[in-house]
Amino acid sequence: MALNTVPVTCLKEHIDSEMHHIRLQERTKQHVREQMEGGKRMKRKMNVGWVLAMVLVLLSCSVAMGSDALNLFREWHDTTAEYHMEEDDQSWLLQLGVMAEEAQLLEDVVWEVAAEDPWPGLTVIFDQVYFDGNKLTIGFHYPCTTDGVRTNVDDPLFDERVLAYKSEDQSEENIYFWHQNKIGVEGSWARAQYQTWVDMEVFGEKYDYQYGNFVGHEQEIYGHLYTVDLTQIPGYQMGDDVELTFVAKQHLWYDYLDDQGVYYDMNVDEDERHDTFTLVVKPESK
Amino acid sequence: MDDRKMIRDAQTAVVRMMEAYGDSIVRLCCLYLKDANLAQDAAQETFLKAFRHYESFRGESSEKTWLTRIALRTCRDMTRGAWYRLVDRSVTPESVSPSMPDEKADYGEVAEVVMALDEKYRVPILLYYYQELQAKEIASILHLPIGTVLSRLKRGREKIKEQLQKGGVPFWL
């Protein structure tokens, strides 16, 4: 179509006009209908017998293997940590298959993201690693009190909180640090926020901040999980070391309302600070 | 409510949603993925996810917002797949053989400009101007402060304007 002018308010009309031939195809609708008719259950109901059997198997395995079987030792220095997984542990995990995902395997590792003016410091605690040789799940949390206020900030003007957001349909939850400095003046205000989040990279695959895998925020735990299906990563072979790189990103945004009531948004997308941390999970036998 | 009734209700709702929002969702996926065929897959997956999780939809946001959220997540997951990156997206419509039954040969000028935006600008622009969501809803979907959404919309608009003007298309805000 010929375009003389494109008012942005008409962007939808233009795109719809340009893409009028792109429609949800009948065969796509048909696939959806067929799969819905396939009798897939929307929600898997827990079978009490199955759960009991799983608990019994887990208990018997724990007794048989002893707690040592789950002990992994760790070394970490500066911003690098290594986990060594005993060969027996790995084979035990492989035998357990999906149940291995339920096991907490590692001691906590603490990553102190250094404070760097104006960025505040941050503590990240890696407290869960589930690894069955193919699927790796990393969990971490930020320590804070139950109401989400961190305790290590003395400046009364500096209101630092961990906020938990629930999406409108409650299907996902998002957390990030929100460091807010409010300067109240009658009729005006200014505030600055430093958001922090942690992304992960493994074998060159980047995993941005995951929204849908929230662990929960009971008591002092605010955290979330990353899950990596290693079988989907080209070149990975079971038993390979798994090196994970975590990047803490801090982002500054500030805005203010002047005494005339005019709002100014001073968001600076490019102004981000990164700090990285490497975690290696490897079989002890290597 | 028994399972069968729940499933029937979900099927009815999803069929209705496909009729009401199908074209809009598949175009959104196409604008995100830059590939009309992948967009059909993403839309199919979106409606199947809606079916599987219909029980959890509480009507606190509109159906359209809910579907948009699922579609975005589906597209995002697809672009993370290693295979996605192997596809050469630098191929121009002109270089594609006319015998190929590919819808992407005719996206249109404005759509192409929007597709060329960085994701951080493209997604808010699509949600605001194409899906016609409020900035507040977009902030919720993208987990960004509303100020960031507004800022990205502003920059996105500027970039669209710049690109269209480069191509000789007048653009006014």
Image: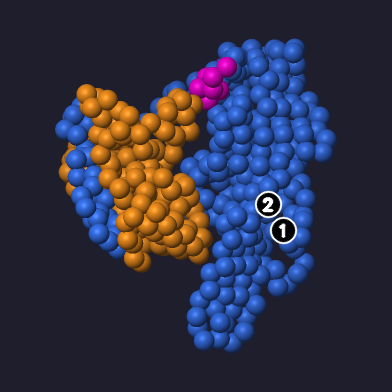
Residue closest to the eye, A33 or A102: A33
Residue hosting label 1: A119
What x and y, as percent, mark residue B44? 28, 34
Magenta span includes A231: yes
Residue found at x 55% / y 41%: A208
Question: Which SS class for mark 1?
Answer: loop
Q: Nearer the viewer, mark 1 or mark 2?
A: 2
| Image-based side of B52 in relation to A31, left or right | right
Mark earlier in primary sequence (1, 2): 1
Magenta range: A229-235
Q: Inspect the image, locate mark 1, and give the three-letter code of the amino acid beneath it.
A: Trp
Residue drawn at (75%, 43%) of the image = A111
Viewport quadrant of the C terminus of chain B? bottom left
**x, y (%) of residue A88?**
70, 12
Distance Cα–Cα, label 1 vs label 2: 8 Å
Name the residue beneath numbered marker 2: A273
Give the SS element for disc 2. strand
A50 on left or right of A71: left
Q: Quarter-wise, where is residue A137 in the image?
A: top right
Which of the 4 image quarters holds residue A105? top right
Residue A223 in the image: state x and y as whole percent.
Answer: 61, 45
Q: Which residue occupies 41% across, 62% down?
A: B136
- Which chain does the numbered disc 2 sit on? A
Would residue B88 be seen by someone viewing this image from the given angle? yes
Residue A236, compared with residue B37, is above or below; it is above
**Mark 2: which amino acid?**
Arg
The reply to whether the C-beta atoms of the residues labelled 1 and 2 are less than 8 Å apart is yes
Q: Residues within 10 Å of mark 2 (few under 14, many from 20)?
A: some
Chain identity for the colour orange used in the image = B
